[in-house]
Amino acid sequence: MNIRTMAEMSGAKALMDSLEKEGVDIVFGLPGGANLPIYDALVDANFRHVLVRHEQSAAHMADGYARIKRKAGVCLATSGPGATNLITGIATAYADSSPLVAITGQVPLNMIGKDAFQETDIIGVANPCTKYAFQPRHATEIPEVVKKSFYIAESGRPGPVLVDIPKDVQQEVTEIKFPDLIKVRGYKPIVDPDLSNVGKAVELLVSAQRPIIMAGGGVILSGAFSELQALAELIMAPVVTTFKGKGAFPENHPLAMGPIGMHGHAEANRIILEADCILAVGARFSDRSVGRFDEFGKGMNIIHLDIDPAEIGKNKSVDIAIVGDVKSALRTMVKMLSKVAAKKSSDNQWLKRRKELIDYFSQNIKDYPRAMTARKALKKLRELLPAESIVTTEVGQCQMWTSLHFDVIAPGTFFSSTGLGTMGFGFPASIGAKAARPDVHVVDVAGDGSFNMTENSLAVSVLENLPVLVFLLNNDMLGMVAQWQRTFYDRRYMGVHQKSCPDYVKIAEAYGANGLKVQSMDELEKAIKSALRTEVATVIDITIDPEEDVYPFVAPGTGLKDMITGA
Amino acid sequence: MSSTEYKNKPLYIISSLVENKPGVLFRITNLFRARNFNIESITVGITEKPDLSRMTITTRIDEAILAQLVKQLRKLIDIVEVEVLDINNTVYRELALIKIRAKDFTNRNEIINFANVFRANILDIGKESVTVEVIGTPDKIDAFKNLIIQYEIVEMARTGVSALQRGE
Ligand SMILES: Cc1ncc(C[n+]2csc(CCOP(=O)(O)OP(=O)(O)O)c2C)c(N)n1
Ligand SMILES: [Mg+2]
């Protein structure tokens, strides 16, 4: 054992050194009694600490950072309420397979189980929404626990890991060893796909008359953008995505069809019904994407490629299952395909049908006869925003309009809380994304209700010089809920009116950010241009109609074929 | 779902090796609850290796759900190995302690006779009860229980199934 890998230090210092060894350059957190030793060690750490105003936002920031960096984000909180405040953020990351290492302080070992002040059994609370949760009981365990946490969070199907460190373990000074290698014997993520199944899949795809690719979040997580594009072009298959997979494929590509699902593109929801072979890549057949499990894919061959064996057959039984890393499996498929088949021609019936559907539904798009609509605003944003900018969203109509009307051009530049649908996610997550990519513009397409939930992150954006653009589609409504009340509850509105409170321009200004209220397309254009020029967070408060609905709509419990286009 | 709905489904025995440390059983049972899996019995005990425990689960479910259950278990990091045992190639046993009401001498004798036929042991005889230890497959224990139910079961404790694959 050489000097550099063994030294006397505190548990808290061991934590800092371990994080550094993982290449951590930023952590998001908020201190309290049970993590004071960690905060003391942070003073001398070689990475940046960002003080948040609410722990939930720390988790969302770390999550947004992780989704863009494609490596684990780190958040810190104290025990009890600090730790429980993290949970919504951890659950959000879990639902979207985002790698996160959440580090909480805990009461000292001898107080655990005594209902001590600010004691919460956070391991128990976090269990259903983490890949694993550690509680080191000696300072000597910390380096190994941290290394395992990053390994588990980032490998296989990524996800959050919790490390709960009792205060006395943080303080304990002892001889610390830093392991080079760790082994987690009960954890064996599958990477290399079974080649015989890949071969069968290739045969099916080649013989299919009407193949379609359904790309999910797994494509983005594994960064398999060029592989996906090569495959699609070889077999000339239209590409739909799930909402989580939005941006896995350039949405201006001649084979792109956009997201399917509850508020998917009409032509995407339609064409997938007409396919004879579906290749689902890194997707999990969620109810929001496929409608009814029993109806979806009937009479078609389904090939399912995913890194998580437990996703195979969970919601949908399939014809061919390939378990493995999406990127390496797609690369193998492309290699095999280029040997067996000449590139298909783009002049075929199936692609003509694709064009027909797009033309048909595009003449059906109904824009409200108002000066300002969400659709027009988002089209303008797309026009003015550089392609490599990162876009995220809040939850509700604002999110679905973004899915429908904002084309993601550079793969991997879009993300949203798709699995949990967490209002308040987008803004802090956009700040995390900005920390990961300070060189590009980052935009949060927000709803007024969602922005309310975490708007205090404006302080972080301003003070930490992490400027983002909040593109606030302000209908003065919990609009998505209002739409459901309009549609399913006979317009009996309850609990949806925001009553013009607060004034978002004043909120922005109170934090030292820019606030711009716009009511016309001209004002909007000016505001976007000015926001893209400034180095300060900007909230563009865009007044839209409180009764604008999102269409198309596949009502819950119905199938894609029952889509209501609203035309 | 009520437990009777599962009665007609086939019995599966899942055998797994799990880390022998605190919190493991919690993670496993929490998975069953969260994913709505029906479990008939679960036993955990130490193995020949001090850092591993063997957990044996019996369940009556459809084959497709069984596959999901096994995959979800495999995902748990504290589970080192999981397999579904082939019942025809497995030795499996359960132990039951049954306290049976025996009002008089005749009752007592009848119960002792039944116990002998089942090679069960009499562990305790009181003024009004007999306590019997039955070891066997769950079916055998059920059969014994169904025989003596006429005398009224005062209390019963069953261990759940322990199992090992035959051969090496
Ligand atoms: C934390 C949380 N609470 C409640 C909901 C339920 N919910 C879904 S959309 C929505 C309305 C969102 O309103 P807003 O952010 O203004 O977006 P809009 O639909 O008006 O565009 C609500 C309350 C949720 N998704 N998340
Ligand atoms: Mg709103």
Image: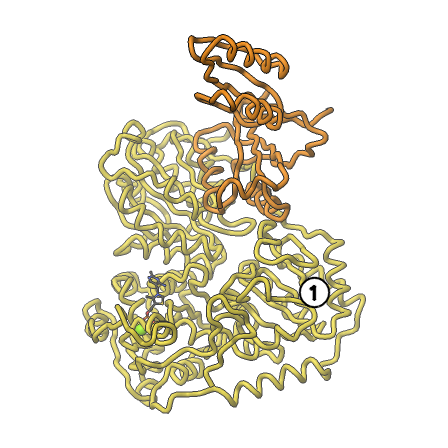
Residue toward you, B83 or B116:
B116
- B122 vs A392, left or right, is right
Residue A511 position in % (x across, y down): 21, 67
Quadrant in the picture for residue A282? bottom right
Mark 1 — residue? A301
Q: Residue at x 47, y 8 (%)?
A: B125
Residue A50 position in % (x across, y down): 31, 55
Residue A395 visible in the shown view:
yes
**For residue B43, above or below residue A470:** above
Amino acid type, callout 1:
Asn
Callout 1 secondary element: strand
The chain under label 1 reads A
Instruction: Give neighbour class at mark 1: few <14, some 14-19, many 20+ (Cα, 10 Å).
Output: many
Q: In the figure, what tint was chain A given?
A: yellow
Colour orange belongs to chain: B
**For residue A452, above or below residue A178:** below
Residue A350 position in % (x across, y down): 69, 80
Quadrant in the picture for residue B161? top right
Q: Residue at x 48, y 41 (%)?
A: A147
**For residue A81, above or below residue B23:** below
Residue A535 visible in the shown view:
no
- A220 vs A66, left or right, is right
Residue toward you, A483 or B141:
B141
Residue A411 position in % (x across, y down): 54, 69
Residue toward you, B79 or A46:
B79
